Amino acid sequence: MTSKIDITFARTARAGGLSILLATDGLMFGESAAQVDPGNVREKAAAIAGFSGKAGGSLDIIAPAGSDAERLVILSVGDPLKPQPDAWARLGGSIAGQFGKAKSVTVWLELPGAEIDAEAASAVALGILLRAYRFDRYKTKAAEGENGKAPERVKVTIVTPAATAAKRAFADAQAVADGVLFARDLVNEPANALGPLEFAAAVKELESLGVKIEILTEKEMKKLGMGALLGVAQGSVRPPRLVVMQWNGGKPKQKPVAFVGKGVVFDTGGVSIKPAGGMEDMKGDMAGAAAVSGLMRALAARKAKANVVGIIGVVENMVDGNAQRPGDIVTSMSGQTVEVLNTDAEGRLVLADALWYCNDRFAPQFMVNLATLTGAIIVALGNAHAGLFSNNDELAERLLAAGLVTQEKLWRMPLGKEYDKLLDSKNADMKNIGGRAAGSITAAQFLQRFVKETPWAHLDVAGTAMGSPSSEINQGWASGFGVRLLDRLVRDHYEG
């Protein structure tokens, strides 16, 4: 992970290096403004720049006279008494966006008329870490303007009256940040560096946090009858793996909650090959599995009081003489047969066996699967929401609520018998595609056939996990979507 930030909390500090002040609408400041800018140049600079303090604005002032700061940035937050969801984390992202080449940053976290508590302060720090992330491990030269030097670590001091409590709260927030960055790193890795074996090895390192890891080989999956997953993998020289993660932080006899991820490390489409344009992005077709892995890291690092299972099916969908053909019929672990009409509808085959295995072995309270499953969900929802499909209203409502808190937003999509009929096959129990219409819905209907009566939700994150628009807390290609969302779900409803 390449977020090179060291964060501390303090009740007081000197205004050295880069100092960042917050202002409300109308340019109202906290008491520390006089210490940072004793000459009050901020008002004259604001007048010259036409800076009014409306939410989202910033003002950069170089070396105010009489100040120990080398540079002063003012960020406006609008009305602090009416914060938007996830506002503090997004403020932290905006703060990190002002760092530039600064090696030392002091953030004066105060606003007139508003009490910024420890949770808000830790959320600001979380946003700083998420925004500061860069995936640059394969760059041998520094970016233009960096004088040929690698970026330095940045020391950030957050000044707040709640410093002691914020430090404790931040330990929890940092665990979540590390989970998000772990997921981003996995998604950003090129497929030549991250095959199924390398993915499994990266996840196995979570054992150091207390996560129990099992890695099922191709031989073991054959014995279990996972013909759907193995059919996808048979065109690649790189063998598949099923990785089982267990975090046992709850009561010994408490049924676990379960998360299942699609981990196609590269997807050519198989014999039903994809167009060349944009195929390089298919290194991210394992973003669902990355999110599950990042979630397990976060839960273990913050010692979540819950029993949680994470399962990822990790394969590569390639083209060679042994690749699966359109028209092939495979037998899933459930015993149900599938006619494969399109080898590019492979993720649902991987998930079919992973979901069945999870349900059969662990009998969880619920299962949530994540997958970059369909381009159709992007046509329906764009990049602002992930698609949510569920057989259980309570689980769906909890997921929707968690998404609003973290701003990893979901939109519930329909399921129904009318769509299910589109999967009927003349030659097998079902086919793996339902035609062009309602493509994301028929994919979900397919998955539902492998969950029995267990409460279940499917999150189609094709438009949100990779290539989504940049935001205050993410400037990269991979977002780590799902880690914070699902951590919030577990935190709010399934711990203790």
Image (tube, helix red, strand yellow):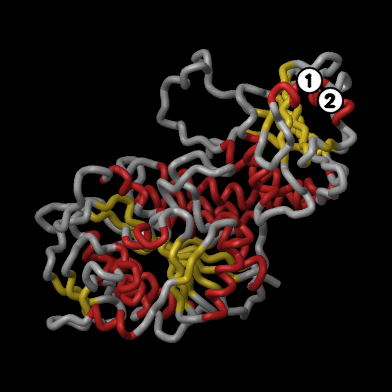
Number of marks drawn: 2
Residue 216 in view in this figure: yes
Question: Residue at 48% of width from left, 46% of height from top?
Answer: 184
Question: 327 and 335: which one is in front?
Answer: 327
Question: 409 and 433: which one is in front?
Answer: 409
Question: 218 and 277: which one is in front?
Answer: 277
Q: Write down the residue under mark 1.
A: 69
Q: Give the class, few, some or many, for how many residues have Cα within 10 Å of label 2's Cα (few <14, many ≥20).
A: many
Question: Residue at 17% of width from left, 74% of height from top?
Answer: 339
Question: Residue at 53% of width from left, 21% of height from top?
Answer: 150
Mark 2: amino acid: Val
SS label for mark 2? helix
Q: Which mark is residue 34?
A: none
Name the quarter where the C terminus is drawn. Answer: bottom right
Residue 261 in view in this figure: no
Please identify the quarter of the rendering in which residue 328 is found: bottom left
Q: Write down the residue under mark 2.
A: 36
Q: Position of residue 294 (x, y in %)?
A: 52, 54
Please identify the quarter of the rendering in which residue 32 is found: top right
Q: Position of residue 135 (x, y in %)?
A: 47, 36
Q: Give the class, few, some or many, for how many residues have Cα within 10 Å of label 1's Cα (few <14, many ≥20).
A: many
Q: Position of residue 127 (x, y in %)?
A: 64, 44
The answer to whether 415 is drawn above or below residue 80 in the figure is below
Cα gap from disc 1 to disc 2, whole angstroms = 7 Å
Q: Are marks 1 and 2 in contact (CB under 8 Å)?
A: yes
